[in-house]
Amino acid sequence: MGDDKRGIDGREFVSLITSNQRRIYSYILTLVPNLSDADDILQETTALMWERKCDFESGTDFAAWGARIAYFKILDHRKKVNKNRQLIADKQFSKFAEEALEQSEHVNTMIQKLEECVEKLPESDRLLIHMRYSIGLSVKKISTRVNKSIRSVYLGISRIQGLLLRCIERTTA
């Protein structure tokens, strides 16, 4: 397989999966709203992608290849979970899955822009956003940690959200 013109080596696979995993995951989440199930499907998809890395044609769209593998994992999941329920017709689901793949690229781009905008914030603002959205702390707990009133924290987060929105709008214009 080393002389095969198709496929990628382990190092290239790791690089590609690292840069495309968020897009594949957002695709899965679009079709599987349960986070635990989506996590499992992503793990199964990544494992299968590794097993089949020799099938990937270097230079083509890695995320689309991964999403196609995820699609079949999602179909397997739907069959297991919905044995006694009526499923969306396969043809309709397939069309929905295609649209989800297109949207996953847009979501990935927006997330990248958001991350870039967050990096531009002052450290104190990044800390507030991190505590609220990455850690998931309540505003009350944040107010205790930063020694500010709950109202002040709400206003701060609202102000930061406005800054981020304007930053994203500027970068997409």
Image (cartoon, helix red, strand yellow):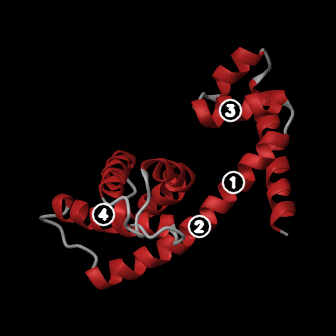
Q: Amino acid at mark 2?
A: Glu
As measured in the structure, the alpha-carbon distance from the residue carrying label 3 to the one carrying label 1 is 16 Å
Q: Position of residue 32 (x, y in %)?
A: 37, 59
Q: What's the amino acid at mark 4?
A: Ile
Q: Earlier in the sequence, mark 3 or mark 4?
A: 4
Residue 160: image location, x then y, percent: 81, 42
Kindly identify which numbered label has been placed on residue 105: 2
From the image, state whether disc 3 or disc 1 is nearer to you.
1
Front in this rendered view, residue 51 or 34: 51
Labels 2 & 3 near each other (Cβ < 8 A):
no
Question: Residue at label 1?
Answer: 112
Mark 2 crowd level (few <14, some 14–19, many ≥20, 10 Å Cα)? some
Q: Secondary structure at mark 4?
A: helix
Q: Would you name the residue on which mark 4 appears?
A: 74
Residue 136 locus on image (x, y percent): 58, 32
Q: Mark 4, residues whose alpha carbon is within 10 Å: few (<14), some, or many (≥20)? A: many
Query: Mark 3–mark 1 contact, CB under 8 Å?
Result: no
Instruction: Please name the amino acid that badge 1 sits on.
Output: Gln
Residue underneath mark 3: 130
Q: Which mark is residue 2?
A: none
* Local secondary structure at mark 2: helix
Which residue is at the front of the view, 29 or 108? 108
Earlier-in-chain disc, 2 versus 3: 2
Q: Is residue 168 above or below residue 119?
A: below
